Amino acid sequence: MTSAIHRPEWVPLLGHRLHVTGVHFDAVRIEGLHGELVADHLIEATDEDAGPIVAEAARGRWVYFLLPPGAAHLYDWPLGVQRLGGRGNRTVTYIGIPALDGNTWPLRWYSAPTPAAPYVCAAKLSAVLGSGIA
């Protein structure tokens, strides 16, 4: 695993910023403890870095897995998993993206983007969700 700092153009320098899905990234969203368990299993199952995963500290404690643009529609995600962005999405969805450090409450990086993993691998995320582990 590499700990190199990598800040894509869509990651703010300070605080957090809203970005529309489907432009810089697609996202898969899972609520609460289930999302955290999926993130933990994805991190464990990934030989290299897992890619960018954003978690909310408030409300439903949603966990957002940031995929390459256009990747969210390539998979049939199980119940409880919401696809945001991609082709055929009729609604515009914004996701809060935190800075890599500093005060970003209520958002935080569960796993930050790195040069080796600028996005979550949709195939690996699908495999973790289909394994029944999480």
Image (tube, rainbow, N blue to C red):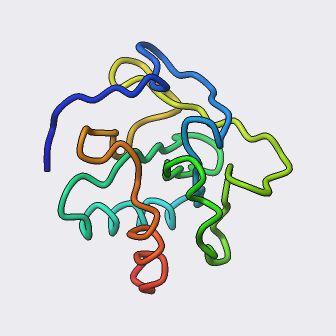
Q: Position of residue 120 (x, y in %)?
A: 40, 54
> Picture quarter containing residue 132?
bottom left
Q: Position of residue 3 (x, y in %)?
A: 15, 38
Residue found at x 41% / y 19%: 103
Residue occupying the far top of the picture:
14
Residue found at x 66% / y 70%: 80
Relative to 50, is 65 on the left or the right?
right
The C terminus: image quadrant: bottom left
All told, the count of numbered labels is: 0
Q: Position of residue 75 (x, y in %)?
A: 59, 72
Relative to 133, is 59 on the left or the right?
right
Compared with residue 85, is residue 106 higher up or lower down, i.e. above or below? above
Compared with residue 27, is residue 15 higher up or lower down, i.e. above or below? above
> Picture quarter containing residue 29?
bottom right
Q: Observer-nearest residue: 35 or 131?
A: 131
Relative to 81, is 45 on the left or the right?
left
Relative to 101, is 58 on the left or the right?
right
Residue occupying the far bottom of the picture:
132
Residue found at x 74% / y 41%: 93
Q: Observer-nearest residue: 54 or 25?
A: 25
Residue found at x 40% / y 60%: 121
Q: Position of residue 44 (x, y in %)?
A: 24, 66
Q: Observer-nearest residue: 4 or 35?
A: 4
